[in-house]
Amino acid sequence: MKILIASLALAFSLPVWASDLPDPGRTPGALNPDVTQDNIYQTVCVKGYTKTIRPAQYFTNKLKYQQIREYGYADKNPKHYEEDHLISLSLGGAPDDPRNLWPQPRNSEWGADKKDQLEFVLYKMVCGRELTLAAAQQAMGSNWIAAWKKYVPSHQNYRVNGGFE
């Protein structure tokens, strides 16, 4: 009976996860070869680093329109999506590789705000030597929702101004 209940719970939770995760065929994630475990204190752990490599807004806006069509979203309003890096720039994600970007829905249980929370927690863990860069990248790239459930509740001390940054 416990197995049946667990199986049903998993089955009912998968559609929510599936709709809030990027399509791994379209957005498998991609890494920035300039960021390694050996140089994180000269790259991602330096305040302001991501601003120096963030792609131009015209590039991400154009890609967002294209990917909304490719993803087949019924809602075509670009304001309802954030063109987001699957593996964040603060964790060594590729800045302008379309395989690392996707139109993430803003208005869902697992929208952009929740992913931002995870990105900040993993960033703090990597720069605080609690987690390797590769482990953080794997967590983000494989299933960021599962990673959120694993890391965010247990790291509530990583907050900025009372909230997540």
Image (cartoon, rainbow, N blue to C red):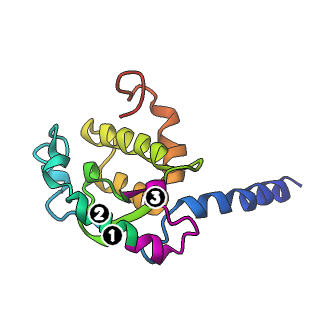
**Residue that appears at 83% across and 54% down:** 5
Quadrant including the N terminus: bottom right
* Label 1 residue SS: helix
For badge 1, the amino acid type reads Leu
Bounds of the magenta segment = 66-83
Residue on which the image places disc 2: 60
For badge 2, the amino acid type reads Thr
Residue on which the image places disc 1: 63
For badge 3, the amino acid type reads Gln
Question: If you read the primary sequence from the N terminus, does the residue marked by circle 3 or circle 2 appear first?
Answer: 2
Q: Is residue 29 found inside the magenta-colored segment of the image?
A: no
Is mark 3 in CB contact (under 8 Å) with mark 2?
no
Question: If you read the primary sequence from the N terminus, does the residue marked by circle 1 or circle 3 appear first?
Answer: 1
Please, which residue is most extreme toward the left here? 42
Snapshot quadrant of residue 35: bottom left
* Label 3 residue SS: strand
Q: State whether residue 104 is above or below residue 129.
A: below
